[in-house]
Amino acid sequence: MRGMRHSESRCGGGYEDHYGVGRHGRWGKHRHGHGRHGGRGDMGSGDMMRAGRMLAQGDLRLLALALIAEQPRHGYEIIKVLEDKTGGWYAPSPGVVYPTLTYLEEASYVTAQADGAKKLYTITAEGRAYLEENRDFVDALLERLEAVGERAQEYRNRDDDRPKVPRLVRSALENLRDVAEERLKKDPDAEAKVVEILARAAGELKKS
């Protein structure tokens, strides 16, 4: 493991969903009980990436190492910092973060010191060297996170400016979206039919 460049440590370079899906499940949707931000809705098609597509395997290792390089951190702090940087739209689960920290410790990139019931992780000289080898890539990852956070704030501000939607109406809209998504999962070719039904419903609302 030691001395490997990031591109060599990706196990084939593929993307793995478990590195992206955190407490909030997916980018842009915070329903199904996954987080504190339920019902905020999509952040725009194409604008926000699914969490599972955001981080390639190993990217979280570099992000965690970069955060630990700033100051010694506990695992939960890493989760919180990433959540804060993205405006609440991405938070890796403990089941992803702690194995990542174990990997960094086994690679001698960090040391772990008992701090009560928790572990405090500190970067090593070898970890700093590895981080510097991948500095450009790490900076690009951090910029991406911050850009997502800025976009999240923009959408949050936009939502705040909108008239409040009654709870029952909001629930009905979420149910409609769930049903539409389920139909498309079963039959991807039904897109035109789904659009037709939604357009008809919108037309009826305009007339009423």
Image (cartoon, helix red, strand yellow):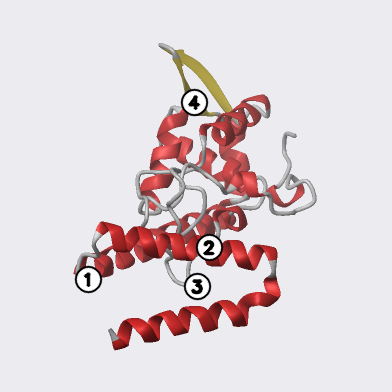
* x then y, percent, for residue 113: 49, 16
> Looking at the picture, which amino acid does disc 1 mark?
Arg
Mark 4 → mark 1, Cα distance in angstroms? 43 Å
- Residue 89 location (% of width, % of height): 42, 53
Q: In this figure, which residue is indicated by the disc labeled 3?
A: 45
Q: Secondary structure at mark 1?
A: loop
Q: How many marks?
A: 4
Q: Amino acid at mark 3?
A: Ser
Single out the mark in the foreground, 4 or 3: 3
Check if mark 3's residue and mark 1's residue have beta carbons within 8 Å: no
Q: State how far apart marks 4 and 3 are (Cα).
A: 38 Å
Depth check, front residue: 175 or 204? 204
Q: CA distance from mark 3 to mark 2?
A: 18 Å
Where is mark 1, residue-wise? 162
Dot 4 or dot 1, earlier in sequence: 4
Of 148 and 139, the residue lying toward us: 148
Which numbered disc flags the more N-terminal residue, 2 or 1? 1
Q: Disc 2 to disc 4, how far (Cα)?
A: 45 Å
In which quadrant is the N terminus drawn? Answer: top right
* Residue at the (43%, 43%) spot, across then down: 33
Q: Amino acid at mark 4?
A: Tyr
Find numbered disc 2 in the image and state the secondary structure of the residue it sits on: helix
Q: Which mark is residue 179?
A: 2
Label 4, on which residue?
Answer: 121
